[in-house]
Image (spheres, rainbow, N blue to C red):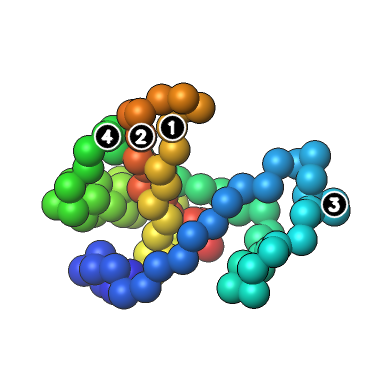
Amino acid sequence: MDSSFKQIGATMHFYIASTFQVNPPSPTENEVYIEDWDNVLIYYRALGSNVEEKVWVDEFTHLATALQKAGHSFYPYMSVGGGFCKPGSKQQRFEGMFVSN
């Protein structure tokens, strides 16, 4: 993501439940790998469903502004967009997130 919140690259991440973190299952595809992250603080905004690009830009801008006003430090060039739904549900919920420094 650049300074105007334009996406310049993307990856897909999945959370591995704590039960499996010590000995996670091995990926079966060469392009899939397990990446360890240090403990971090995540700041996020729930965006709802059926989110258009303008909403993503606006909400990341609002989140960045709120964090700066509150004096919180975050890395603005790596944002995380998350989507999830309840099992069996057709509705998906989206969230925009920044990672703390």
- Point out residue 3 in the picture as x, y percentages from the top left corner: 26, 72
Three-letter amino acid code of the residue under disc 1 = Cys
Dots 1 and 4: beta carbons under 8 Å?
no
Dots 2 and 1: beta carbons under 8 Å?
yes
Q: Depth check: 33 or 64 in front?
A: 33
Dots 2 and 4: beta carbons under 8 Å?
yes
The label shown at residue 92 is 2
Q: Is residue 38 left or right of residue 77?
A: right
Q: Nearer the viewer, mark 3 or mark 1?
A: 1
Q: Depth check: 66 or 78 in front?
A: 78
Q: Is residue 20 left or right of residue 36?
A: right
Dots 3 and 1: beta carbons under 8 Å?
no
Q: Depth check: 50 or 71 in front?
A: 50
The label shown at residue 22 is 3
Q: Is residue 30 above or below residue 36?
A: below
Dots 4 and 3: beta carbons under 8 Å?
no
Three-letter amino acid code of the residue under disc 3 = Val
Question: Residue sitting at 79 percent across and 53 percent down?
Answer: 24
